[in-house]
């Protein structure tokens, strides 16, 4: 066990590692005696036991965030220093953290290593992010009733931010919410997904060691279905930054009342493949866009809308490319496809594939699973009466839908209830611009597949894909409030 993490867990009487969580600067102050198990999806090994917090623990965390030493006097330089320290600690422990991510999520080690690097990158770029807080000067001269006035508009912290995060990037997604929340001067209560709580427990330890004052960062572990409403409805919480499914996001909207909401929800990215595209590039990048992290990404390509004239050629190339995706032990550096997260996810994926096959789709590859390892799967002759044309898959499945022309592709793409990402493959840049403006998604990528990455470009959803935008200099916007000070010249 690595030094800085040595006292966040212990080996219990059954020989299992039991984790503590931090509330109010204390790693052993959880009131609930209940726990839940965290298992490795690749081999079902029990890798940790974690507190199953009760409502008293949630309220204690909220109280702690409320009464913490006021972060408003915790100045920019100090906050930046903490981020710098956290980056160093993260990088010193990068391999250990990547292994934790892989063990709890079943994703290949190479992807977990990338996730740790992306988190370090996010910590490195905080100088750029914090600039948003500098505010702006507005002259009043443009309008007659403000002729003799000017204003400065500054950003203030909202107060307490609750972050609620999913399983698929358990370190990065949580960090990308917590970092801007702290930079802005908020206090934080962080709730990880119950399948993958260990990465965030370790990250909270890193932030503590980096210098976060007592009570400013707190973590709560336990089922969202049990604790969610207590967090969301609490009047002392000022903002909810949530990434997860649309169902849960809609429930948050119903219950949160007048809080700031930043919701990153489901997606159903279409890849529009036009006859004039570079077909080798399309086949290669679409495989990556579909299969990476077993398709468990909100930005995963999950329907290919392809013009008839190049469909056969595309299928030929994509089948060759898909052979390169090695499925196997996630701890093996050569593995590209690990497991999906749990049985519920597996059954959902398999249900969508079976529905498509029953309604006439053709299975070109895959369609099988062993344990929680779902094979990269390619389906052609997919039609719009099949569930897989509309529902989020969150699995390594590529449904190919033939279209007559770009108009039909745009119509099908926009008919989705989601509006997060889409992409277009064409060599005609003017045409690409024209189509990209007609698509209703938060981001449209040209000649590559969507990849939110570190968040250098802002991303976020329209329609049922969410409210607000994530990204460097954008997330911080969601977690602050504008404060205008107007000066009158005499
Ligand atoms: P999920 O089931 O919605 O869970 C997300 C988080 O919400 C977990 O921490 C979960 O806790 C918690 N939760 C569950 N019920 C809740 C409730 N009633 N109130 C408050 N919180 C509750 O999503 P997931 O399966 O982990 O993640 C996959 C989804 O996330 C997909 O739909 C994907 O598209 C979306 N996603 C979106 C983005 C984006 O940027 N737009 C990025 C990544 C993922 P428990 O684990 O304890 O249930």
Image (spheres, grey):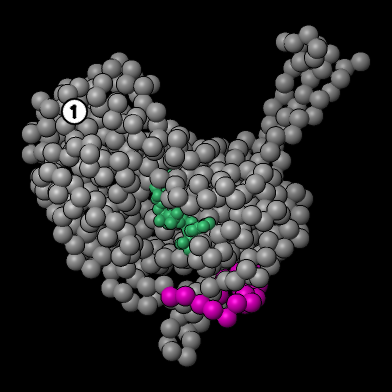
Q: Is residue 159 above or below residue 18?
A: above
Please state if 356 lies on the left or on the right of 77 as rendered.
Answer: left
- Residue 32 on the magenta segment: yes
Q: Is residue 244 above or below residue 423?
A: below
Residue at the outermost top position? 144
Residue at the outermost right position? 490
* The image quarter in which residue 410 lies: top left
Residue at the spot of label 1: 403
Residue at 72% across, 29% down: 153
In-front residue for pair 299/354: 354
* Magenta region, residue range: 19-37
Residue at 44% across, 47% down: 246
Helix, strand or loop: magenta stretch:
loop
Residue at 62% across, 75% down: 30
In-front residue for pair 223/485: 223
Secondary structure beneath label 1: strand
Q: Residues within 10 Å of mark 1 (few under 14, many from 20)?
A: many
In what quadrant of the picture does the N terminus appear?
bottom left
Q: Position of residue 260 (x, y in %)?
A: 63, 43
* The image quarter in which residue 348 lies: bottom left
Please state if 26 lies on the left or on the right of 18 as rendered.
Answer: right
Please state if 417 lies on the left or on the right of 310 as rendered.
Answer: right
Q: Position of residue 419 (x, y in %)?
A: 40, 35
Q: Is residue 118 above or below residue 407?
A: below
Q: Position of residue 366 (x, y in %)?
A: 14, 54
- Residue 175 on the magenta segment: no
């Amino acid at each position: 066990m690595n030094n800085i993490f040595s006292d966040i867990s212990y080996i219990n009487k059954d020989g299992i590692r039991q984790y503590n969580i931090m509330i109010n600067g204390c790693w052993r102050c959880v009131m609930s005696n209940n726990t839940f198990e965290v298992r490795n999806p690749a081999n079902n090994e029990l890798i940790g036991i974690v507190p199953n917090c009760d409502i008293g623990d949630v309220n204690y965390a909220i109280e702690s965030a409320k009464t913490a030493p006021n972060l408003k006097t915790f100045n920019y330089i100090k906050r930046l220093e903490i981020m710098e320290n956290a980056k160093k600690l993260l990088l010193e422990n990068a391999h250990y953290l990547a292994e934790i991510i892989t063990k709890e999520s079943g994703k290949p080690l190479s992807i977990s290593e990338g996730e740790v690097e992306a988190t370090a990158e996010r910590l490195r770029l905080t100088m750029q992010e914090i600039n948003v807080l500098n505010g702006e000067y507005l002259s009043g001269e443009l309008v007659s009733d403000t002729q003799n006035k000017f204003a400065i508009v500054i950003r203030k912290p909202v107060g307490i931010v609750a972050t609620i995060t999913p399983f698929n990037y358990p370190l990065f997604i949580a960090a990308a919410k917590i970092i801007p929340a702290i930079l802005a001067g908020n206090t934080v209560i962080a709730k990880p997904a119950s399948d993958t709580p260990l990465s965030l427990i370790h990250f909270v330890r890193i932030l503590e060691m980096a210098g976060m004052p007592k009570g400013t960062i707190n973590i709560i572990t336990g089922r969202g279905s049990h604790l969610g409403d207590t967090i969301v409805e609490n009047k002392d919480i000022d903002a909810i930054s949530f990434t997860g499914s649309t169902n849960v996001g809609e429930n948050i909207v119903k219950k949160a009342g007048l809080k700031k909401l930043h919701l990153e929800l489901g997606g159903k990215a279409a890849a529009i493949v036009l006859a004039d595209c570079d077909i080798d590039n399309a086949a290669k990048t679409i495989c990556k866009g579909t299969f990476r992290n077993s398709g468990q990404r909100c930005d995963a390509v999950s329907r290919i809308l392809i013009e008839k004239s190049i469909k056969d050629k595309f299928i030929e190339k994509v089948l060759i490319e898909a052979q390169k995706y090695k499925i196997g032990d996630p701890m093996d550096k050569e593995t590209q496809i690990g497991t999906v997260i749990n049985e519920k996810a597996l059954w959902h994926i398999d249900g969508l594939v079976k529905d498509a096959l029953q309604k006439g789709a053709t299975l070109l590859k895959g369609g099988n699973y062993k344990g929680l390892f779902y094979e990269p799967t390619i389906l052609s002759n997919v039609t719009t009466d099949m569930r897989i044309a509309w529902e989020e898959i969150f699995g390594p499945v590529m449904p190919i839908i033939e279209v007559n022309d770009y108009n039909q592709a745009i119509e099908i793409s926009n008919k989705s209830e989601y509006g997060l990402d889409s992409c277009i493959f064409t060599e005609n840049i003017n045409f690409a611009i024209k189509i990209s403006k007609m698509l209703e998604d938060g981001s449209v990528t040209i000649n590559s597949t969507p990849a939110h990455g570190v968040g250098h470009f802002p991303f976020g959803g329209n329609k049922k894909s969410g409210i607000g935008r994530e990204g460097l200099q954008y997330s911080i916007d969601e977690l602050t409030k504008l404060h205008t000070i107007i000066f009158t010249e005499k």
